[in-house]
């Protein structure tokens, strides 16, 4: 601004004498009684209060937004469908074991009975085979007969959604805060997503979550009558997957908790008496569940398969899915992070009861020993973090509130279904699409050549492709496949040595007796067979090679 009548060029910067500022500050202090430094403090405090009020208003707005029912329902739709959407985008029937499960179901439907000996391999032809997953095998084959490979796809989608729903409700029971519960569940589901496959083991994940919810509810003071749901779960569990023993072990930990408390003197006398009073229900449930596992075609003999698996330590260093976590995938780090957070949460709460330390130690042991069990650590860690974070209020829903809850659940279910159907259509899922992926992962072209030329056995193949060859070549018995309870540690180890061209590969008796070999080109044996005069190459593509005996 310029004074009237004054040219701009006449103006210059005002220069104050040294000390003028101090004189002005002293004058202001004399007149007002407030020093310049205090004035600055007052101004800064006012600005700080304004900033604090702004932060509080923003936080209040976010809290109000987060408590809106529509927002929470949209969050649940995303939580329930996230892992399923990831799977749909890159789905393929790539699991090598699903094929022998389907072949077993086909055999049962054709013969209207369970096999007594192994009908699929040369080695197991005279050996007893207990089909512990017969119910799953029947179900998956029925799906395939009705819907083709799309049936396997739909089964996988259903498993993703059911596990997400069950885990969220378990965490919510322990931690009523909505967004914290969603966050913990989402992190745990991400870690679990690594091991999703169309296998009976996914039933173990789901049944474990359901069992843990019942046990924790009773432990927290709810009616012990809920425990009588467990024998019904175990009847189904024992006919679907052999890892029902995990459920028995989990129930045993709950039953033994008071004993550990007393031995380690972790609680007062009153707390011990209360824990022992509750433990009698767990022991009764354990006995009932143990008897329930006998309701299967083999009765108590089913436990012989458990013993077989316990005597196969070498498989944990040979089979990829049984090996320890390599920390080459982000899910491994997430699982380890969950375990660390759970340990911190347990220590922070200074719990006087040993349940969570015991469960976390057991789950960490099995998960770090075998990546296939990463789900167990993720579920236990999520629950350990959630339990005790905030008190869980007892909520009594009125009739109107209950109707609203069910209305919201219907909305969430419809939203999940719509989102999955949209993804299904967008990705153009079909039997032909899945079959193309299967042909790129398994020796489909080689199988077609064998069928066209009616090549006879004995067949020699590797561990990984055995299940697929069982399914596609029902007239030929395989040399090896993924059923380690049939073939045992020694045969799995020998298979690895031969296919990797270790010393002595050429003296393997099964290889020497073979008339037909389906070889994966990634193995050293495939190149060695090209130079072996006992065999000749008759077919080859980018993934596999077919050799026959030179005598043919």
Image (tube, rainbow, N blue to C red):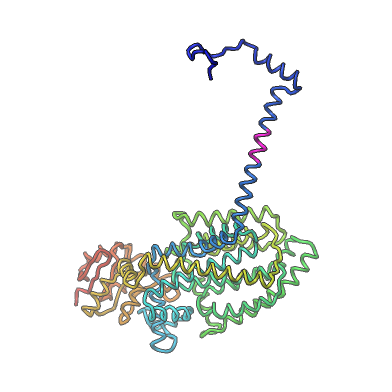
- Residue 423 position, x and y percent, is 41, 65
Which quarter of the rendered picture does the C terminus lie within?
bottom left
Indicate whether residue 418 is drawn in magenta.
no
What secondary structure is the stretch in magenta mostly built from?
A: helix
Q: Is residue 416 left or right of residue 178?
A: left
Between 178 and 418, the one nearer to me in the picture:
418
Residue 142 visible to an observer of this rendering: yes
Image quadrant assignment for residue 138: bottom left
**Residue at 58% across, 53% down:** 340
Q: Is residue 48 above or below residue 275?
A: above
Q: Is residue 120 above or below residue 215?
A: below
Q: Is residue 462 left or right of residue 213?
A: left
Residue 364 visible to an observer of this rendering: no
- Residue 5 position, x and y percent, is 52, 13
Q: Is residue 482 left or right of residue 335?
A: left
Q: Is residue 308 above or below residue 500?
A: below
**Residue at 70% across, 60% down:** 391
Between 331 and 150, the one nearer to me in the picture:
150
- Residue 195 position, x and y percent, is 47, 64
Tell me where the magenta segment starts and ends, as one range.
45-52
**Residue at 72% across, 59% down:** 352
């Amino acid at each position: 601004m310029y004074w009237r009548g004054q040219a701009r060029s006449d103006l210059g910067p005002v220069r104050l004498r040294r000390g003028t500022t101090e004189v002005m500050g002293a004058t202001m202090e004399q007149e007002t009684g407030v020093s310049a430094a205090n004035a600055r403090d007052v101004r800064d405090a006012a600005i700080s209060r304004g900033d604090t009020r702004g932060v509080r208003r923003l936080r209040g707005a976010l809290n109000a937004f987060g408590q809106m029912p529509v927002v929470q329902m949209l969050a649940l739709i995303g939580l329930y469908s996230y892992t399923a959407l990831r799977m749909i985008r890159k789905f393929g029937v790539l699991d090598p074991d699903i094929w022998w499960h389907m072949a077993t179901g086909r055999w049962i439907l054709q013969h209207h009975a369970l096999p007594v000996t192994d009908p699929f391999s040369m080695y197991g032809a005279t050996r007893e085979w207990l089909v512990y997953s017969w119910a799953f095998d029947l179900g998956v084959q029925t799906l395939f007969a009705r819907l083709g490979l799309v049936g396997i796809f739909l089964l996988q989608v259903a498993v993703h959604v059911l596990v997400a729903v069950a885990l969220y409700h378990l965490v919510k029971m322990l931690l009523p805060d909505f967004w914290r519960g969603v966050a913990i569940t989402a992190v745990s589901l991400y870690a679990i997503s690594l091991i999703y496959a169309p296998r009976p083991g996914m039933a173990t994940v789901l049944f474990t979550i359901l069992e843990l919810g019942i046990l924790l509810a009773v432990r927290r003071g709810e009616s012990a009558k809920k425990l009588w749901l467990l024998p019904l779960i175990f009847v189904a569990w024992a006919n679907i997957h052999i890892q029902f023993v995990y459920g028995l072990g989990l129930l045993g930990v709950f039953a033994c908790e008071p004993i550990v408390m007393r031995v380690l003197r972790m609680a007062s006398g009153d707390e011990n008496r209360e824990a022992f009073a509750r433990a009698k229900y767990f022991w009764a449930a354990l006995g009932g569940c143990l008897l329930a596992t006998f309701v299967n075609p083999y009765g108590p003999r089913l436990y012989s398969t458990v013993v077989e698996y316990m005597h196969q330590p070498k498989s944990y260093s040979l089979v990829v899915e049984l090996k320890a976590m390599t920390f080459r995938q982000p899910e491994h780090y997430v699982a380890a992070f969950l375990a660390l957070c759970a340990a911190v949460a347990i220590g922070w709460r200074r719990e006087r009861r040993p349940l969570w330390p015991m469960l976390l130690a057991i789950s960490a042991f099995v998960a770090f020993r075998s990546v296939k069990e990463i789900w167990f650590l993720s579920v236990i860690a999520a629950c350990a973090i959630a339990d005790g974070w905030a008190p869980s209020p007892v909520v009594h829903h009125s009739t109107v509130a209950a109707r609203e809850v069910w209305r919201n659940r219907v909305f969430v279910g419809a939203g999940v279904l719509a989102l999955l159907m949209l993804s299904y259509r967008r990705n153009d899922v079909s039997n032909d699409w899945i079959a193309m992926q299967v042909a790129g992962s398994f020796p489909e072209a080689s199988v077609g050549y064998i069928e066209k030329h009616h090549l006879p056995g004995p067949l020699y193949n590797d561990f990984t492709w055995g299940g697929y060859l069982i399914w596609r070549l029902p007239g030929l018995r395989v040399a090896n496949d993924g059923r380690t309870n049939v073939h045992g540690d020694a045969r799995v180890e020998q298979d690895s040595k031969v296919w990797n061209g270790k010393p002595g590969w050429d003296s393997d008796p099964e290889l020497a007796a073979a008339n037909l070999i389906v070889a994966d080109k990634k193995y050293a044996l495939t190149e060695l067979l090209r130079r072996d005069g006992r065999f000749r190459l008759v077919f080859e593509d980018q993934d596999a090679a077919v050799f026959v005996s030179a005598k043919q």
